[in-house]
Amino acid sequence: MRFPTFLGGRKTALFAAAGFTLGCALAVAAVTTVEHSGAWPPASVKVAQHTGSEDARGYARVLKGVLPAVVNISSSRIEKQDTSQMQGLDPFFRQFFGDQGSQFFNVPQERREKALGSGVIVSPEGYVLTNNHVVDHATQITVTLRDKREFTAQVVGTDPRTDIAVLKIKGSDFPCVTLGDSSDVQVGDIALAIGDPFGVGQTVTAGIVSATGRGNLGIEQVEDFIQTDAPINPGNSGGALIDDQGHLIGINTAILSGNSGGNQGIGFAVPVNLARHDMDEILKYGKVERAYLGILPQDVTPAMAKAFGTTDTNGAVVSDVTANSPASRSDLKQGDIIVAVNGKSIEDANQLRLDIGMLAPGATADLKVLRNGRPMQVAVKLGSFPANQEQASAEQPTPNNNSLQGVSVQNLTPDTARQMNLSPDTRGVVVANVDPSSNAADAGLQPGDVIQQVNHQPVSNVQDFEHALASGRKGNPTLLLINRDGSTLYVAV
């Protein structure tokens, strides 16, 4: 290959065609000589003279007031090193020096881990919203503003269930964002993501709101995500998701990246209303207090709705009531479908968890439920969310019809119950086998499940099971209450 050659006042260039396709025309394999006249630009070159308003230039005006309030967060923590294997040292030396040999061969006992993320200043006093995973277990946190000022931050409080953390930096008159109302966010709204992806520096990306109320993703225990296609990458965590007015609508939290590790157009942000609730709780009480009902809710599938005598799939089925919980001390029953809380309609199990969690412990929740197809009101005095309480998963495959062909069951004996770590008073029949091609398998029934009810009829043995099946209405789904690993849930087949 020959390179361009410069000779005096003349410039000679050779364009090579091999592999050069960056939006250019095909390279011309010829040598062109251009005489430099000294005048630039030539009269024939058109130079843009911008005369329009800032609004016509996109979102520059909106971002001017927001960018100074989005910060870079650098955190570090000390991790203990496992030197028991003394990796990198010959076994001969380990034989003589043992684990203490690391002291002689400079094997570090500890190492410092660093993380980069983003945050949003939400008050002139220096309160910063970010993700809990950005600062979790950090021993030192540094906040860097857009104007290059650096501050050491203190953690005011965190809520790992929602992945929200509140930090404080010393000072006053900090730039801050205006909080929006995420309940007004709609699919199709403009969304701008601001953060520090990969540590390259403050970056703005644009997209739309792809979905709202995303849950059951297994990312966090409490999920009500705003989904956006605005590019979000590692380092954006804790940054701002704003609308086209510059109002904060979410805190960027997670992405689905496939195998690439980068943006695939599916990003998630914690809605600002949820983040604000956490911040208010943290500033008032030092922690987030969530109300607790004490049930295992499930989504209502079409087949399940039909089995419960309704056509409405909105609401959440009470598949289990936790012992010694607020629900157990109320009139709420297993099999009730909760369709409203304090007059607000419930769409699914995830929304029920969110709405209950946003209430204060000790408050009374007025629940509208459907019991055997009839509406009724149940009042429950809520408790405090237990620290070790895990979020229940309520995802169930949608069944096709009511056939239980391909399912074999056997009596639940005391020995079998003991082997399955079930309570001695557990009654039902054990699913011994499920044909993988059967409707029951499609509905989620598994070997080892203990069927305790068929169409609301308790079963204690195989005879009860067969009798309950025979008494079901032809063409209707078969509703099973099963015990799986000590928890009960409904399956409609």
Image: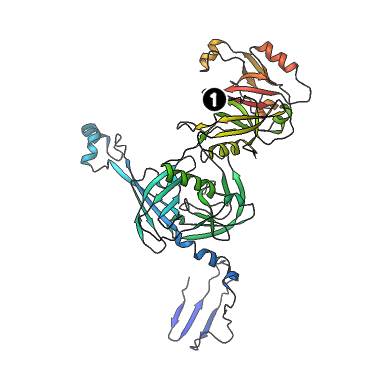
The answer to whether residue 106 is left or right of residue 316 is: left
Q: Residue sitting at 55 percent across and 32 percent down?
A: 392
Between 387 and 208, the one nearer to me in the picture: 387
- Give how far across and how far down residue 463 sits, in percent: 68, 11
Res. 483 image quadrant: top right
Question: Would you place residue 247 above or below residue 477 in this image?
Answer: below
Residue of label 1: 322
- Give how far across and how far down residue 331 sits, in percent: 61, 24
Quadrant of image for the C terminus: top right
Is residue 270 in view?
Answer: no
> Which color scheme does this rendered protein use?
rainbow
The answer to whether residue 290 is left or right of residue 286 is: right
Number of other residues with Cα within 10 Å of mark 1, as a class: few under 14, some 14 to 19, many 20 or more: few
Question: Would you place residue 299 above or below residue 117 in this image?
Answer: above
Q: Residue sitting at 61 percent across and 35 percent down?
A: 349
- Give how far across and how far down residue 150 sits, in percent: 35, 59
The extreme right residue here reads 474
Is residue 226 in view?
Answer: yes
Question: Would you place residue 352 above or below residue 147 in this image?
Answer: above
Res. 393 image quadrant: top right
Q: Residue sitting at 59 percent across and 44 percent down?
A: 214
- Give how far across and how far down residue 131 sits, in percent: 45, 47
The answer to whether residue 198 is left or right of residue 305 is: left
Mark count: 1
Per the image, label 1 sits on a secondary structure element best described as: loop
The answer to whether residue 477 is left or right of residue 116 is: right
Res. 217 image quadrant: top right
Q: Amino acid at mark 1?
A: Thr
Between 95 and 376, the one nearer to me in the picture: 376
